[in-house]
Amino acid sequence: METPNQQPTNEQETVQSETEQLVDLSEKRWLNHYPEQIRHTLDYPEINIAQFLIDAATNYPKKPALYFMGKTITYEQLYASADLLARGLGRLGVKKGDRVAIMLPNCPQAVISYYGVLLAGAIVVQTNPLYVERELKHQIRDSGAIALITLDMLYPRIAKLRGENPEEGPVPKLRTVVITSIKDGLPFPKSMLYPIKQRREGFKANIPYGMHGYISWKSLQSRTALSFERPTLPLHEDIAALQYTGGTTGTPKGVMLTHRNLVSNTLQSMEWFERVRLGEEKYLAALPLFHVFGLTVLMNMSVCSGGCLVLLPKFEVQEVLRTIDRMKPTIFPGAPTMYIALINAASKLAKPLELSSIEICISGSAALPLEVQETFEKLTGGRLIEGYGLTEASPVTHANPIWGKRKIGTIGLPFPDTEAAILSPETGQFLPPGEIGELVVKGPQVMKGYWNNEAATEAAFHQGWLRTGDLALMDEDGYFIIKDRIKDVIIAGGFNIYPREIEEVLYEHPAIVEAAVVGVKDPYRGETVKAYIVLKDKVAVTEEQLNLWCRERLAAYKVPHIYTFRDSLPKTMVGKVLKRQLLEEEEQQHE
């Protein structure tokens, strides 16, 4: 045993030296660059996320909550519909803690269903309407969902999934399927004309209502449901939603987001959007609400602020431009690919549209090129900032100040009550500013864990910090810069190459609309750099010209060795390029 006077050994000196090199995580240097109006820490009420709707219906009963293709729904109407749905689900046997899947595009029923399920005390399982049978089967089975709310046009897929005998089929726990139609959310006379349009397009529902648990939406909106008593709302620490990861790498996992997680991230976002006018804002919902980005920054935030959600069932460039011109939305969260498409389309309009109502845009899901940011701000006169998040954090953890000091090329500063650090993948120690490592985060918005997957939950955390899987660095001011996904880093000839850096250079080229960079197998270098390019209409550029462009702006080992020109890039619903699909295509061609 060491006595008080004993001198430390060389090994102890090394440990002490390493300890001294550890970052002081209590420093939080980013707080020095918060705009004066933004608080460093917030109060988070211990409430159910559905309380936002209850409060909005009380404070703004006659204010428009939703706008969809000519139909306006006020907050008192939205709450009444959600309440009826909650009671109707209760009559069907949905109990507190049960999982209910929602498989809908952006339409009034998607919002009513979300809050209705929460008011019923159940857990929301957001499901992508584009999922095929295999993906659906995994999510329904894994979540144990006992009910599903979906569209009539998706019935054939659901029927195939359940089989001829649903009670003994692939998803036997799914005993109830509530079917709605786009017409249920339309105003008169569009609601009358829509079925005619469907028949002309060859659609026949033939849904066996009353059999195998198939229920019509309208039957759950009947006032007879008022006789059924709603359960008490789940507590703030209970699970509100199972939000499945995108599955861009591996099998999708169910992220357990509690009411506290979602309430916290909504209020953090409200604080960051410091100039939000309660009861006045219009949110353009072109992002899908079933995605966690749209869930928080559109649906939850709009209802929390008493705003109006302008719903678009999908992102169509011309329709988005017309909607901005006609409806005058003020807040427009999106992805870089959306802003790029709008810039290109607006430049070709014969008659300019009025786009100046847009005041705030937050870009997520991918890197925001500087040219896109500057051009879109000139086009609208609003502010476009880059933020960062992940499903496991509800999702937002970082953003550039909207009216404060922005740093181009960074994801900005951690949100209030959010801690962030850079972890060395090799040593597990925290790194000082300027060094690249894995971004890890802490905060009230961080998930409870993965549903029924303790091993994945344990792997996702390091001493209480959520591992993001992204390589990043923090600068001297506390702004964070994403270098790339750990799994996306290209190792060519012993050099670490970050695709994001090369993509930024390619985006600066005047002929390029979109670019994606991946590492492909190379017998000499191990991997080499391949760039997929989408060019602007009627613009030509050669590989030699792109090669020269890159060599003037990048170290030689980073310059792409292969260029492939395409008409488009495969993307997720929120505009993130599916690099996995590009690599799968590459492997098939190689074979």
Image (cartoon, rainbow, N blue to C red):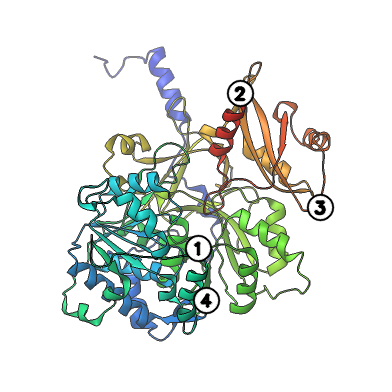
Q: Nearer the viewer, residue 19 or 236?
A: 236
N-terminal-most mark, 1 or 3: 1
Q: Quadrant of the C terminus?
A: top right
1 vs 3, front mark: 3
Residue 189 image offset from top left, x and y in percent = 48, 84
Question: Is residue 251 shown left or right of residue 433?
Answer: left
N-terminal-most mark, 4 or 1: 4
What residue did someone put label 2 on? Answer: 521
What residue did someone put label 3 on? Answer: 538
- Local crowd size for mark 3, using a 10 Å CA cut-off: few (<14), some (14–19), many (≥20): few
Question: Is residue 574 shown left or right of residue 262?
Answer: right
Question: Is residue 158 shown left or right of residue 176?
Answer: right
4 vs 1, front mark: 4
N-terminal-most mark, 3 or 2: 2
Distance Cα–Cα, label 4 vs label 3: 34 Å
4 vs 2, front mark: 4
Amino acid type at circle 2 is Lys
Distance Cα–Cα, label 3 vs label 2: 32 Å
N-terminal-most mark, 2 or 1: 1
Residue 98 image offset from top left, x and y in percent = 22, 57
3 vs 2, front mark: 3
Mark 4 near mark 3, Cβ–Cβ under 8 Å?
no
Q: Secondary structure at mark 1?
A: helix
Residue 221 image offset from top left, x and y in percent = 29, 77
- Local crowd size for mark 4, using a 10 Å CA cut-off: few (<14), some (14–19), many (≥20): some
Q: Secondary structure at mark 3?
A: loop
Q: Secondary structure at mark 2?
A: strand
Distance Cα–Cα, label 2 vs label 1: 43 Å
Find residue 192 and name its label. Answer: none
Amino acid type at circle 1 is Trp
Amino acid type at circle 3 is Lys
Amino acid type at circle 4 is Met
